[in-house]
Amino acid sequence: MTSIDPETLNSILATDCGSTTTKAILIEKRGPEYRLIVRGEAPTTVEAPFEDVTRGVLNAIMEVEELAGRKILDGERILTPQRGGEGVDLYLSTSSAGGGLQMMVSGVVKSMTGESAQRAALGAGAIVMDVIASNDGRLPHQKIKRIRHLRPDMILLSGGVDGGTTSHVAEMAELLAAADPKARLGAGYELPVIYAGNKNAVDIVRERLGKKVALVITENLRPVLERENLGPARDKIHDLFMEHVMAHAPGYRKLMTWTPVPIMPTPGAVGLIIETIAREEGIQVIGVDIGGATTDVFSVFQGVFNRTVSANLGMSYSVSNVLAEAGLPNILRWVPFEIEERDLRNRIKNKMIRPTTIPQSLEELIIEQAIAREALRLAFEQHKSLAVGLKGVQQERTISDTFEQTASGETLVRLDHLDLLVGSGGVLSHAPRRAQAALMMLDAFLPEHITELAVDSIFMMPQLGVLSTVHPRAAKEVFEKDCLIRLGSSVAPVGPGKEATTALRVTLTLPGGKTEEFSIPYGSLRLVPLGLGETAKASLRPEKGLDVGEGKGRERVVSLKGGVVGLVFDCRGRQPFRLPEARPARIAKLNQWNEALGIYPPRDASKVSVGELAPLAARA
Amino acid sequence: MAHSYTPGLKVSSFTKLARERKLPLPGEVLVSLGQRVAAETIIARTELPGNVQTVNVANLLGVLPEDVEECLTKPPGSKIDKGEVFAESRSFFGLFRSKVHAPVRGTIESVSKVTGQVLLREEPIPVEVDAYVDGTIAEIHPNSGVTVETQGTFIQGIFGVGGEACGELRVCAPNPGEPLDEKAIGEPCRGKILVGGAYVTTAVLRKAIAHGVKAVVIGGFDDHDLRELLGYDLGVAITGSEEIGITLIVTEGFGSIPMAARTFDLLRSCEGRRVSVSGATQIRAGVLRPEIVAPRLDEGSPRDGGDSSVEEGLKPGDTVRVIRQPYFGRIGRVTALPPELMPLETEAKVRVLEVDFGNGSRVLLPRANVEMIES
C-alpha cells in the first residue's frame, strides 16, 4: 500500500472502467469539506479497434476537463500534483472492464469449504465461474475437462479444516495438476492459484502444483467448522488481481503506472462502501448495482457482509439472458400496455447486439424498466441462496430456542429486518424520475414493514469505495452529500388481504405539527410527499392478519424518514404479492400504481410507437 | 468537445485483411512463409491430450496408497489398451490375485501416493486448423499457427450463428427490401452462400439446410425464429459453435430490416465468387462480429486508410442508421450536432443529433442510437 497524506489532498480524480462506459469524477476540497465537482463519461475501450483501456479513461477525463473548465491532462498524462488551477493531487481507479475478475474456486465439501471459498472470491469482487468439490457429483475426468475449458483468471483452492482431511485436498490438487489450466489473458504466464485450506496439506499442495502454476499459500479460510476467516484469502485475490490479471488486460499496465493506489475490482470497491454504511449506522443494508453485463448484490445482516454477482444478468450485454432466465411472461407482467411477443423479443435482442443504445420513447423506457425489475429480482434470489449461515455447524440450543428453531445454512437476508435498500447502476441511477427507481426496487425486492430507499445519484460508489482506502473522510463526505440520494421510506404490511378492503390506517404527524389521517385499501399504493431531511411521526394500524413489524393487527408507532420521493405506503401485499392474472386487469393495476407514484409523464396508452416522424419543433 | 464516436460495422469494397489461425495447443505448422493457400488448406495440426480418467487402485486392490506404484504392471508413461490389466496385487502367499483393468485405451499418466489414484490419459485427439480464406501466408507463429493475409471485399454483420464456411456467393433477392423467398432455394444452391434481402424465416432456413446451403446472409431475422432454429433462448451473445447445419449472418438486426443498400450492392458485385464467412459473434470482452470475405488476390493492392468513422466521430453530412426504436432501421443524414443536452420523451437529458430522413423530415435522436455507415 502506498503512503499518501490525506491532509495534502485538495483535488482527487477517480475513474471506474465499466464493461460499457468509463466514468470519471472530480472531487475537490471546498472550504472544510470534500465535494463532487463534475462527472464525465466515455465508452470503455478494452475492445478492438482500441484495445487500450486508457483511451476511454482519457476521453472521460477530457469530458471532466471540459465541464470543470480546468486542465487535468498534459497530452496523455495526468498532471499531478495540482499546481494552481491545473492538475489533480491524486488519481485512482476501479475496473470491471474485460469481463471483470473471473475465478474458479474449489473446496472439499461443496456446501461447506466450497461455499466459504465462493464467498471469499465473491467478496473480493470476482465472478465465480464454477465451484469444484470432491462431492459435487461430477466424475474426475468431467471436472478436469471443466477446469480446462473455463480458463479462469485465478483459482482459489481450499478444503478441510486445520488438522482435518488432507487426502481430499490432495485429490483436488491432483485434478488441478492434471488439467494444467491456462490463464484467460496473456498466453505466456502461469495461472495464479491461491491455496487457503488445511494447513497440514500445504506441503502436499506445494509438491503437486508448485511447478505447474503460480502458487500462493495463505491462511485457511475455514480453520474450524464454526468460523470463516475470509480476509487473508480476499487480500491475496486483490494482490494477484493487480499483479497478474490487470497487468495482462489491454492497456492496464499503463493505467497502473498512473495511480499510486492499486486498481480495485469495481464490485470490491462498492462492497467496501456498503459495509461502511452498515457499520457506521448500525443497520441492516442491501445494496444492488445493476450494470450492463452483471448485477451485484451486497448485504450486511447481523454484521455479516455478503456479496454475490449474477454474471449474466444485466441491462445491455446480458439483457437477452434476463429474458432467457426470467421468461417472457415474467417480463411482460410489468409492461402496462399491449405489446406483441415477437416485437418485444426483437427489441430485447437488438439491445443485446447494440448495447450502448438508450431508450428514446417512453414505451422503450417502460420496457427497459420492466426488464430491470426481473434482472434485480433474479439477482436477489441468487443472493438470498448464497448469503447463508455456515453449513455443517451444530447449533447449541437452550429451552428458549424450542419455538424458534432455525436450521444451519438458512439465509441471513431478512426483508423484515432490512433498514436501508440502496440501488446503483445506470437503470436506477439514471432513471429520469427518482420515483421510477423507487418503484423498480420495491417491485424487485419486495421489502417488508419499514425500509428506507436510496439510490447512488450518478453511479459513483465504486470510485468512492477505492477512495475510502486512502482517504475515508473525503469518501464519506462525498458519499453523504453528493452520492447517496435518499428517496424516502416504504411501509409495507405483510400478509394476505382482500382486494379493495382497508389494509392499513395511518395517522401522520408531519413537520410543523400538521396531522393527516387516512386509510389505504389492500392492493394499492399511496405516496405522501415528505422532503429530504424531514421526518414524520406515524401511527400505523394494520388490519387483522397484516403485520407492519409489531405482529398481526398490532399498531406500530414510528418515525419515518422522507426523501426526494417521499413516503410510499405499499399495501399491494407481501407474502403473497400477486399481480392480476388476466392481461386487461393487470395492465389496469400497473397503470393505477404508476399513477399513484406519478412515475411516468402522461402518454397515449393506446399505441406503441412505430416510428412516425414527429415534427422537429415538438421534440426540441 | 470530448470524443463522441459511434463505431459502425465495416463494409469495404476492397481492403487488406489478416487473419490469425492458431492451434489451441502447440503443434506442427504445415505451410511456409509466402505460400498461397486456399481456404480449405490445412495450415497446422496438433493432438489434444486425451481426457483423463482416474482409477482408485488403492481401493480396488485393497492396498495402501503408497504401495500402489509397486502394483503397476507397467511404469507410468506406458501405453495401455482398454481392458488390459495395469495393476495387480497378490495376497495370502501369492495365492489370490486382484487385478485392475484399464477402462480406456491410453497412457498411465501418474500415480498418487496420497490418494492411491492412478490417472489414465485417453488417446490424443487430432486437431487441424485450415486457412479459412484464400490468401498468402504472411507470418509463421512457430508451433502454433500462421497469419493469412488476403485482400478483397469485406463486410461485417451485426450478429451470426454457426461456424466458418466457404463457397460460391449467390444473390437470391431482387432487392435489399425483399425477404428471402422459399422458391429461390433449390438444388442449384447446394454448397453455396446465399444472400437474401430484409428477412428470412426458420422454415426457409430449414429448406436451405435440406438443400446443402452453407450459409445465408440476410438483413433481419426474428428472435422468435432464432429460438426455433437453435432450440433454446440465446442468453449471451457468444456464438459460432452452434451445430445447426448452416451459418446465418444478420447484417442489420432483429426484425424485418432491409439490408443496407451499400452492403447489398457489394454482395451483388461478388456474385459467383468464392467467399469465406464466419458466424462467430461475441458481444463482450474481445468483441467479435460475423464477417463475409470475398478475396480478390490478383487485383493489385488496395488503398491504405481504414475506417475513418471510428477515429473521427460523427459530423454533419455523415450517413447514419438509427439502431433503436422508434425509428429503428431508418437511414438518414446528419444535419446538426447540437452540443447541449436535450430532453427526450422519456425526460432524460442526453446528447442528441439532428437527422434528415429525406423529404425534409428531420428529427432529433440520441447520439447513442445511431451508427455511422459508409456512404
Image (spheres, coloured by chain):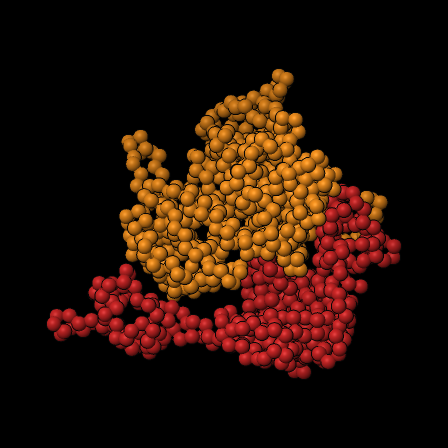
Q: Is residue A450 visible?
A: yes
Q: In the image, A195: left or right of B366? A: left
Can you give x and y, in whole percent of width and height, for residue A604 in the image? Answer: 74, 44
Of the 4 image quadrants, the one containing the C terminus of chain B is: bottom right
Q: In the image, B166: left or right of A241? A: right
Compared with A508, B340 (above or below) is below
Can you give x and y, in whole percent of width and height, for residue A317 in the image? Answer: 61, 54
Residue A32 location, quadrant: top right
- Residue at the spot x=56%, y=72% of the render? B141
Can you give x and y, in whole percent of width and height, for residue A387 in the image? Answer: 44, 43
Along the line of sight, the residue nearer the viewer: B322 or A435: B322
- Residue at the spot x=57%, y=62% of the render? B238
- Residue at the spot x=37%, y=46% of the render? A219
- Residue at the spot x=55%, y=62% of the render? B232
Colour in which the image shows chain B: red
Along the line of sight, the residue nearer the viewer: B159 or A117: A117
Numbered marks: total: 0
Q: In the image, B375: left or right of A21? A: right
Q: Is residue A312 visible?
A: no
Residue A388 location, quadrant: top left
Colour in which the image shows chain A: orange
